[in-house]
Amino acid sequence: ILIKAQAQNGFQANYDEAKVPAYTLPDILKTTTNQPVQNKKTWEKVRRPEIIRLFEENVYGQTPKSYDRLTYTVKNENAQAMGGKATLKEVAIEVVKNNKPLTINLVLFVPNQKKSPVPVFLLINNRGKDNMDPTRAQKSDFWPAEMVIDSGYAVAAFHVSDLAPDDTTKYVNGVLQLYPEQLTANDGMKAIGAWAWGASRVLDYFEKDKAIDAKKVMVVGHSRGGKASLWAAAEDQRFAMCFTNCSGNTGAALSHRRFGETIRRINTVFPHWFAKNYKKYNDNEAALPLDQHMLLAAIAPRPLYATNASKDLWADPTGTYLSVKLASKVYELYGIKANLPANPPGINQPIMTSSVGYHNREGEHNLTAYDWSNFIKFATDQFK
Ligand code: GTR
C-alpha cells in the first residue's frame, strides 16, 4: 500500500485508505423525515427536491432563476470552419436583470455533415481561453473540437470568467452584480453557482438556435468546472447528460471520507466558490446532512459520467467511484440497473452502463483526448 501524507498549502492530506475515518452517509433513499423512497414518484416529488434544497442551503447556494431579458448577437459566423467540416458561430449572449447586463461569449461549432438539429457537448472552460480558440490556430485536448465534430456532435464552450472571475475578491464582478442579494445571504451563490447559472443561460440560447437539439445538451466540466457541471445538471433538468472530469472534493467525491482534499482546505483556499454556510462543515463532515452521491443522484435518470486520473489522488478516485455507485441506486427506481462492481475498475478500464459511466485514466489531473473519446462513446451509446 502506498502511504503518502502530502502537505498542500500547510494542509495535511490523507492518502491512506486505512486512515479514512468511519462515517455514515445520509441515505439517498430516505426522506429527511425518515420515510423510505421506493418509487420514482416519491423520488421526484419529495426526495429529489429535498436534496436540491440541501445543496442550495449548505453548499452551492441559491441559483436565481429569473431575469428580465436574454438576447444574443452572432458576432462571427463561418460556414467553412475546420476545412469546411463545421460552421463556427461566435455568439454574445446578453442577459439583463434590473437593467444590469451580463455577456457570455459562446464559441460553437456545428458539424456540416449532420442534419440539424444536432446534440451538443458544452464545456464550462475553467482554464485558458486559448483552449477554446475559435480560429483553431491553437488546438488543445482540453477541448478537442475537431474530434467532437468528426464524431457528429456540435461542440461549444464558454469561459467561467464571463460569469465570475476565479478570484477570491473579483468573483463578484459578474452574475453577482445582477443578483446583489446573493452576496450577503448565507446561502447566496458564489463562483461555482455562477458558472452553473451560466451553463443554464447557454442552454436558454440553444433553445433558440435551430442548429442545436436543445433536448440533447451535454454539460462537461473539469475539476472546478466539473463541480459546476454537476451542479448545473442537478439543478437544471433540461441538461440531457453530465460529464464530470476529475471533479474531486465538492464535485463527485465523497466528502465524509476526508481523502485527499477536504472541505476545510477547499473553503480556505477557495473561499469564493461556495456559499458561506458551507464553512460550517470545515473539519465537521460528520455534521453534513448530505454527501456528493446525493448530488449525482439528483441527475438521475439522465446519464452521468465521472472520471478520475490515476495520479490525481487529491480528487479521491475511490471516493468518486463509491459516490457513482451509491447514486446508481436512484437510477434503479427508473428501472435502469447499473450493477456496478463493488470495487473501482482498473486504470484505463472504462465502465459504461445505460445510466452511469466511470473511468480512471492513467496520468495526471487534466482533461484529455482519452477522456473526451470516452465521453463521445458513452453519449453515442445513450442516444442509440
Ligand atoms: C485544485 C482544487 C481542486 C480542483 C483543482 C482544479 O487546486 O483543490 O478542488 O478544483 O484545483 O480546478 O484544477
Image (cartoon, rainbow, N blue to C red):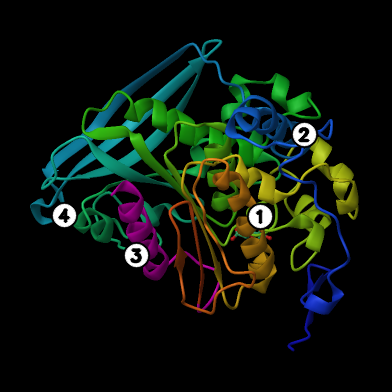
Residue 51 position within the rendered picture, expressed as x and y whole percent measured from the top left: 70, 35
Crowd tier of the residue under label 2, counting other residues whose Cα lies within 10 Å: few below 14, some 14–19, many 20 or above: some
Q: Quadrant of ligand 1?
A: bottom right
Q: Quadrant of residue 43?
A: top right
Task: Tell me which numbered mark, 1 or 2, is placed earlier along the sequence.
Answer: 2
Pointer 1 residue: 326
Residue 82 numbered mark, or none: 4
Task: Tell me which numbered mark, 3 or 4, is placed earlier along the sequence.
Answer: 4
Is residue 35 shown left or right of residue 116? right
Magenta stretch contains residue 314: no
Pointer 2 residue: 31
The main secondary structure of the magenta stretch is helix
Quarter of the image with the N terminus is bottom right
Magenta stretch contains residue 366: yes
Give the residues drawn in magenta, as a range: 362-384
Task: Tell me if the residue at label 2 has its CB under 8 Å from ligand 1.
Answer: no
Task: Tell me which numbered mark, 2 or 4, is placed earlier along the sequence.
Answer: 2
Q: CA distance from mark 2 to mark 4?
A: 51 Å
Q: Secondary structure at mark 2?
A: loop
Whether tag 1 and tag 2 are in contact, CB under 8 A, the answer is no
Q: Secondary structure at mark 3?
A: helix
Q: Nearer the viewer, mark 4 or mark 1?
A: 1
**Picture layout, residue 158 above or below residue 308:** above
